Image (spheres, helix red, strand yellow):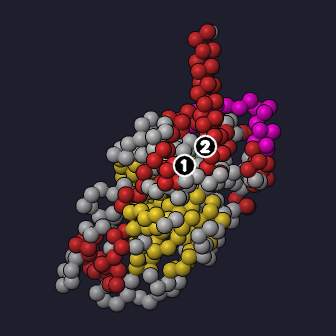
Amino acid sequence: MRSKFANRAVFASLAGISVGVGALSAAHWSKGPKVKQDASLLRKLPLNLIGMVSYYAGSLPIPVALREPAYKSYCSKLGCDVSEVAGDLRDFRSLSDFFARNIASDFRPIDKTASLVAPCDGTVIAAGPVGAYGSIEVKNITYCIRDLLGAREREPLAVSSVAVADRKESGARLWYTVIHIEPGQCHRFASPTSWSVSERTRIGGYLLWLNPDISGLYTENERLAMLGEWDHGLFCLAAVGAAGRGSIYIDKEAESFQPHFRPSRTKVSRHKYHDPRNLTPGQQMGGFKLGSAIVLVFEAPEQSFKFHASSGERVRLGQKLATVGRFQAMSPGTTITKRNAEANGVQSNTTSRARFRRAW
């Protein structure tokens, strides 16, 4: 009995420490930190340990009688609408479960006119075309999509990917968007379009604070990348963890991805689906037990693609994010024509796309 009581006391103490550190950090960052100085300090703090403790503390069951008032109080302070929650508040066993709550479908209709819908509730931090050498820019900080998605060195990102050198021939290019999920918002994410997922990659790393001004945030934090294809080529979705919020899960998979005890950017695990997962717009994919950010990287026609949400704009799951307009059929000699010809055993007299893909 004493041992059981002691274990609970130790756990409660650790939980209190994690909450205290989180509160102090939140207060510090709300005052406008000097990010360049603080970023190096954050990498020295045991944020992964705090994330693990926060996860387990958030998973502790709340007495049934206290759940409804507790969640209503939480929602009132963070500005989320209790009426949107699907189900009874008393059914959410813990705070982590409430973070990953479902929203009633009536409150999140899927825009049928969109080629791409918002995969989650949140704020668009950045959106635009991918630059030279696979670079994207967020808050004037440059990242490489290969690092973001955990691509192997000297291997193509995906069989379908169109390199910059091949862009004029195919009429397509790569695009990206970054969406941050705020604490009071639903922490589930859904499929943004009709696509087929062929591979899942988990990349280890830090659990830095979710501040886009921190250099290396999206390529150094723990993240889970889903790679596949849609009608226009490559399509990838990356779920990025953050301080105190590193637990990520995928629906219909037994494994839940918890933060590593020690940050290690070399820990990369890959899983290829024997049968690719075919998803439709708005279909639930997974969630964060304590939230973070979603990054989309995808191919689309350069001339007919258009974003409908700009940086700084708040979006809701299912809202129109982008459209691909009608475009002319490709003439002989285009990338897709050559791909189909190669599949049928017809030799092409033009340079193979594999040569360009290695440039990634």
The label nearer to you, 2 versus 1, is: 2
- From where the camera sits, is residue 190 visible? no
Asked whether the beta carbons under mark 2 and mark 1 sit within 8 Å of each other, the answer is yes
Q: Which residue is mark 2?
A: 25
Q: Horizontal and vertical percent for residue 94?
A: 67, 36
Q: Quadrant of the C terminus?
A: bottom left
Magenta stretch containing residue 262, yes or no?
no
**Residue at the image point whose x is 44% and y is 89% from the top:** 328
Q: Quadrant of the N terminus?
A: top right
Q: Label 2 to label 1, Cα distance in Å?
A: 9 Å
Q: Which of pointers 2 and 1 lies earlier in the amino acid sequence?
A: 2
Identify the secondary structure beneath mark 2. helix
Left or right of 346 on screen, residue 75 = right
Left or right of 214 on screen, residue 313 = right
Q: Horizontal and vertical percent for residue 312?
A: 62, 67
Left or right of 25 on screen, residue 106 = right
Of residues 284 and 184, the one drawn nearer to the viewer in this rendering: 184
Please, is residue 3 above or below residue 100 in the view? above
Q: Horizontal and vertical percent for residue 132?
A: 36, 73
**Residue at the image point whose x is 21% and y is 83% from the top:** 350
Please, is residue 239 above or below residue 14 in the view? below
Q: Horizontal and vertical percent for residue 11?
A: 59, 24
**Residue at the image point whose x is 45% and y is 44% from the top:** 43
Q: Which residues are magenta?
A: 55-73
Please, is residue 147 above or below residue 97 in the view? below
Please tell me how crowded label 1 is: few (under 14), some (14-19), or many (20+) other residues with Cα within 10 Å. many
Please tell me how crowded label 2 is: few (under 14), some (14-19), or many (20+) other residues with Cα within 10 Å. few
Q: Which residue is mark 1?
A: 209
Identify the secondary structure beneath mark 1. loop
